Image (tube, rainbow, N blue to C red):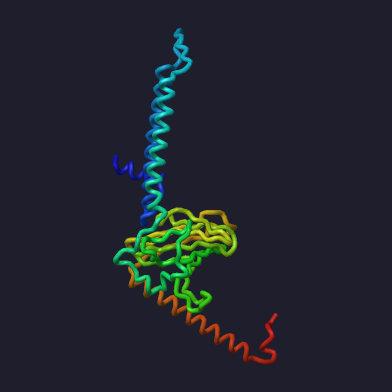
Amino acid sequence: MGHLLDTTLAFFTPAKGASPNAKDIHTLFVITLVIALVIFFAVEIALGYALVRFRKRKGAVPAQIRGNTRLEVSWTAAAAVILLGLAILTFAKLSAIQNPPNSGPGGASLADFGEPAEDHLYATAQRHLPPNGKALEITVIGRQYIWQYVYPGASEPDGLGAPYSYEEMVVPTKTTVELNIVSADVVHSWWVPELGGKFQAVPGYHNYTWFKVEKPGVFHGQCAVLCGRGHARMIATVTAEEPPEFEAWLARQKQLIAEANHEAALARAKLKAQTGPATVENP
């Protein structure tokens, strides 16, 4: 019976959270679902009883009841109490959903990624930071039809040269990750169910969210708003690794970008040095 209940709830509820905010969202959803199911079955049982108990019988004259004030007041008050209880529970959980905790003792060293910079990492009405103000900031850019993730560590003053990846975001475990979500074209929606709620990527605006993964794992998501004919292929993957593995991955990304930039510089220099017909592009 317990396994059947767990299976049923798993079918109707979001994936269990791997981040504190996602866990709180999941808890609220399950509590609301259980209350709704109890009310649903209570109403259906009462309806079934009324259909059988008061069905039409030959020769019987049913009682003509115009109303029941006590019953009507009771179910109205019960509904109000349930709604009030859900509201109180939601507001009690809301702070933990919105406000990220500090990174754990085994998290990545944020100083290695240039975070936080006093003039860059700041809190606003939409952006919430951990109590100590330290988080790994990753910029999530929605593009038709792929997600780009830009990490701190730009080599140029204007922000260029920062390491980045496409489709797969790699993060360190036990580390609070702050997401700065933007769009380069149309409206997209960032959603990895096991790591929190949906957040839209809107051109010209910044939306913020966070997550913190305790154990290594792979989490899957997708753009959750129709953004064009390639929308179904706009998937998102978050891979959580231990801090040493993450730092090695990030160093490798920086190396690959540096090598690509060097090759591009050589190609530009070679093209610039060419003279004669070779400089004319073939039609």
With respect to residue 168, does 58 lie above or below? above
| Residue 205 in picture, x, y percent from top left | 55, 60
Q: In this view, does 283 lie to the left or right of 251?
A: right
With respect to residue 35, does 23 lie above or below? below
- Residue 202 location, quadrant: bottom right
Of residues 32 and 274, the one nearer the viewer is 32
- Residue 101 location, quadrant: bottom left
Of residues 175 and 216, the one nearer the viewer is 175
With respect to residue 253, does 236 lie above or below? above
Count the marks: 0
Which quarter of the rendering shows the N terminus? top left
Which quarter of the rendering shows the C terminus? bottom right
Q: Which residue lies furthest to the top in this view?
A: 59
| Residue 3 in picture, x, y percent from top left | 30, 44
| Residue 25 in picture, x, y percent from top left | 40, 49
Residue drawn at 45 percent across, 67 percent down? 121
Residue drawn at 39 percent across, 32 percent down? 41
Residue drawn at 42 percent across, 73 percent down? 114
| Residue 40 in picture, x, y percent from top left | 41, 33
